[in-house]
Amino acid sequence: MSTDPSSASRKFDMRSTLSVLGKLAKDESRTPEDIAAIESAAEGLHFIHLNGKLDDFLDYLRDVEKAAERGTRIEASFGDMSEALKWLCEQMEPRFGARVEVAGKPYIVVRQRKEMWFLIPAPRIPSFEELTGES
């Protein structure tokens, strides 16, 4: 995905994007893996929209590097879980996936059902080198 400001400034049109994904999936030269990936991308866009996160996605498209930094940044630190849960309850609308630190350990803000927010231990984020196999 381009981080060129001129391409990021174009308005994202979900309907036309889904239409293009549908046309790509029907292309006879596509492998079953290609079709599965295209269908997953379309379902992912539907999920983002249905969960009210389209604006977050658009922010991400505007500046991919800054969005990635926000995804790994610790938003708040707490001495113990009771402080963290108190903070979580006080949030009007916590950001899904926000990372917090409790007693020096990372946690992620998640939602099970509407209005039911909680913290889960955050997985370790692999380095770029680990992800790409580069040294």
Image: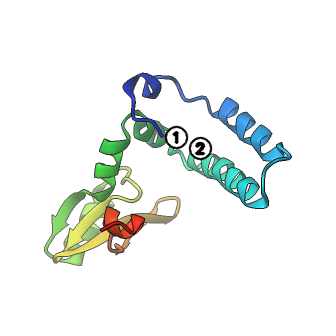
Question: What amino acid type is highlighted by mark number 2?
Answer: His
In the rendered image, residue 6, in percent from the top left (x then y), is placed at 42, 22
Question: What amino acid type is highlighted by mark number 1?
Answer: Leu
Element type where label 1 sits in the image: helix
Q: Residue furthest front?
A: 135
Cα distance between the residues tagged 2 and 1: 5 Å
Does residue 69 appear left or right of residue 8 in this picture?
left
Residue 118 visible in image: no
Does residue 72 appear left or right of residue 10 in this picture?
left
The numbered dot on residue 49 is 2
* Camera-nearest residue between 57 and 21: 21
Residue at coordinates 32% horizontally, 44% vertically from top-left?
A: 65
On the image, which quarter does residue 74 sit in? bottom left
- Structural crowding at the residue carrying mark 2, measured as other residues with C-alpha within 10 Å and reported as few (<14), some (14–19) or many (≥20): some
Which residue does the numbered mark 1 point to in the structure image?
A: 54
Which of marks 1 and 2 precedes in the sequence?
2
In the rendered image, residue 89, in percent from the top left (x then y), is placed at 32, 62
* Camera-nearest residue between 64 and 83: 64
